[in-house]
Amino acid sequence: MTRQMSGAKMIVQALIDQGVDTVFGYPGGAVLPIYDEIHQQNAIRHILVRHEQGAVHAAEGYARSTGKPGVVIVTSGPGATNAVTGLTDALMDSIPIIVLTGQVPTFMIGSDAFQEADTVGITRPCTKHNWLVKETDALSGVLHEAFHVATQGRPGPVLVDIPKDVQFATGTYNAPKPSVSHYQPKVKGDMEEITELVAAMEKAKKPVFYTGGGVINSGPAASQLLRELVKATGFPITSTLMGLGCYPASGENWLGMLGMHGLYQANMAMHDCDLLINIGARFDDRITGRIDAFSPKSTKAHIDIDPSSINKVIKTDIPIVGDVGHVLEDILKVWKSRGRKTNAEALSKWWAQIEEWKAIDCLKFKQTGKTIKPQHALVRLEELTRKHDRYICTEVGQHQMWAAQYLGFEDPNRWMTSGGLGTMGYGFPASIGVQMAHPDALVINVAGEASWLMNMQEMGTAVQYRLPVKQFILNNERLGMVRQWQELLHGERYSQSWSEALPDFVKLAEAFGAKGILCSDPADLDDAIMEMITHDGPVIFDCLVEKHENCFPMIPSGKAHNEMLLGEAQTQGVIDSKGSVLV
Amino acid sequence: MSALKIKKGATSHSAYNLRPTFSDVIERHTLAVLVENEPGVLARVIGLFSGRGYNIDSLTVAEVDHTGHLSRITIVTSGTPQVIEQIKAQLGRIVSVHDVHDLTVEGASVERELAMFKVTGTGDKRVEALRLADIFRASVVDSTLESFIFEITGAPDKIDAFADLMRPLGLTDVARTGVAALSRGE
């Protein structure tokens, strides 16, 4: 169906036709025609953020918690440059985002006009793809293609830069068609390789599933298939930070998260296994530790929709390029048709070994005295909220790792965190995006006070839209992870890693018209958390915690999985100078 | 907790230098990349190489299919086998890229480059330059009483050899197109 309309109207029409119900944005000179159209319709809700970075992270939270793409509208120049961090974050974590930026009129491009920036140039390396649309007739096609590219294959952020004269001019609108795009990534895995993997699974004595964000991105069906496969084979399963929730934390075969701050049993299983099955993860350096000592005895299979992930870091013996859901379906089919075989005797020995590792209880800590340990705060938060319809976001740092360690995720799309880029300031706006998508759910952002302050202006957004997001701040008055590394690697010289002038978070909440809760005594913690949960509105929870707590377990930089530190007692002199150059 | 003894200059190393590679042999590969001819497509390809630290030894680009708006980029690059594999996979990931061919591994191929050389001089040197140009089948495309411009087409090493010979004879300027390559046969 084709119709004549203005470019600005086309944008709104394309969003409606793509099934968008919510957009996050901030108006400005170069997007005024679009905002004029937004004003004249009710199909799409626009959430006014307080900073463009917040808009992108909110859209990420929306996307990650729904599986649908998030949409952002910002103005030219500073609007676009403020979106860059969010775009990079979404690229690293494969989150589908469509960012629409205004641009100065086509006839002024290149003249250093007011609020002009080379947006497509600046965002080329931090988007999956981007477009500058110079003709209104081309606009609807590009917008539909943008949704296609953002969501197909390995998802990612895309950006469409739209000059103001293109928004004003009239052109022909085309409705979305079944894709005419040449961009059609392969989703089915090669059957020969799948069969090879199944044969390896049948014989494996010490197998482990190493899963990642790709399982979540593939959709809820992939998580279901994964659960079926784990149950059927009885293999142990671990997951990266990005994959938490693809297999339930309460599941029998769950080893917990792996990696730098992963659980002892997960990392030891990775190191000692003879068959490593990577499903939708990318051998990130936080996972592998020292490359030449990474899982030295295993045959490695790698399922990934992005061919460039294969052999990028770790040499793969059985590469399978395809969508996790499709490939898992085929693995199950082949495995069943070949008689559902596993090496049961060896597996039970493997599990006995894993149970020994588990018995070390690497997350053990002692809550004593009158100061709240951050781990204790999270154990109580988990206990008091796990029965709720709950979504967790985090900022970046120690609190993020503790949240990953001490909170349990039963389902996919319930955990929003900045993994690849490690963006402080991600969690608060992300929680706003999640709450928009799930108005009745309990949305908690586990934060550190330093990260949280990076996007604290979004309190205005939370209050304006009455979003009852709970900001659970583990306040140690430090940049905790920086402080920990300075302690371990830089001779306890705590350069610039503490905040001397923190706000009174309760008063800050009140200044925005929200509720603030201060808790510093372990005896008050449960009541305070309950007060936070039951309050119908946004809450800043200022939880004063132990200031010098370190995050363990930890694989020091440059070390192998079996060289984990389990507590402060063991850290003496373990990181050598070679390791200290890694971050 | 003990302070760690960090060697002087330790932090000047890139973390990536510590990564073992799968093979240390540096290989030279010629890649043919078919891309949609749209604004910024060359920047995407070049940005990939600079952003990820890959080498470009030579690069040529031109639209080869005017109706389909497809351009062919010929890139000569070098790296370990693992790096070459990554380059191809990363190129394939760019949305505007339709096809990536590694002409070095996909059977025999022909590589050609066009170059122009300005050689200035008089007397014996001038005569010698003209004689050598004849041997190399270079043609004279411009001449003054004190200079020639030679045009030469051939494989890159032939052009290198010609440049080496012209240098003592008064070579003042070189322009090279970079490599264009096609696979042999059908």
Image (cartoon, coloured by chain):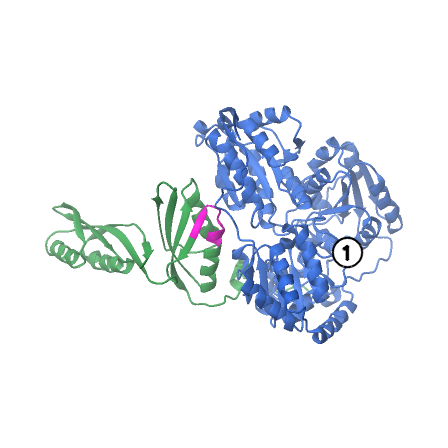
Q: Give the quadrant of residue A578.
A: bottom right
Mark 1 Cα within 10 Å, few/some/many (few <14, many 20+)? some
Q: Is residue B98 magenta?
A: yes
Amino acid under disc 1: Tyr
Tag 1 residue:
A406
Left-right relation of A337 to A361: left
Q: Give the quadrant of residue A85.
A: top right
Q: Going by the picture, which residue comes out furthest to the left?
A: B123
Q: Is residue B170 magenta?
A: no
Left-right relation of A135 to A150: left
Task: Tell me the residue at 44%/60% (across/down).
Answer: B84
Residue sitting nearer the eye, A476 or B23: B23
What secondary structure is found at the residue carrying circle 1?
Answer: helix
**From the viewer's perspective, is residue A4 above or below residue A459?**
above
Q: Give the quadrant of residue A304.
A: bottom right
Q: Which chain is the one coloured green?
A: B
The percent coordinates of residue B10 (x first, y second) are 55, 62
Question: In this orientation, does residue A295 appear?
Answer: no
**From the viewer's perspective, is residue A352 above or below residue A61?**
below
Left-right relation of A478 to A291: right
Viewport quadrant of the C terminus of chain A: bottom right
Q: Mark 1 falls within which chain?
A: A
The percent coordinates of residue A299 (x first, y second) are 59, 70
The percent coordinates of residue B56 (x first, y second) are 39, 54
The percent coordinates of residue A235 (x first, y second) are 70, 66
Task: Tell me the residue at 86%/51% (across/down).
Answer: A522
Question: In this orientation, does residue A424 appear?
Answer: yes
Left-right relation of A360 to A93: right
Task: Tell me the residue at 52%/51% (across/down).
Answer: A185
Q: Which residues are magenta?
A: B90-99
> Drawn colour of chain A?
blue
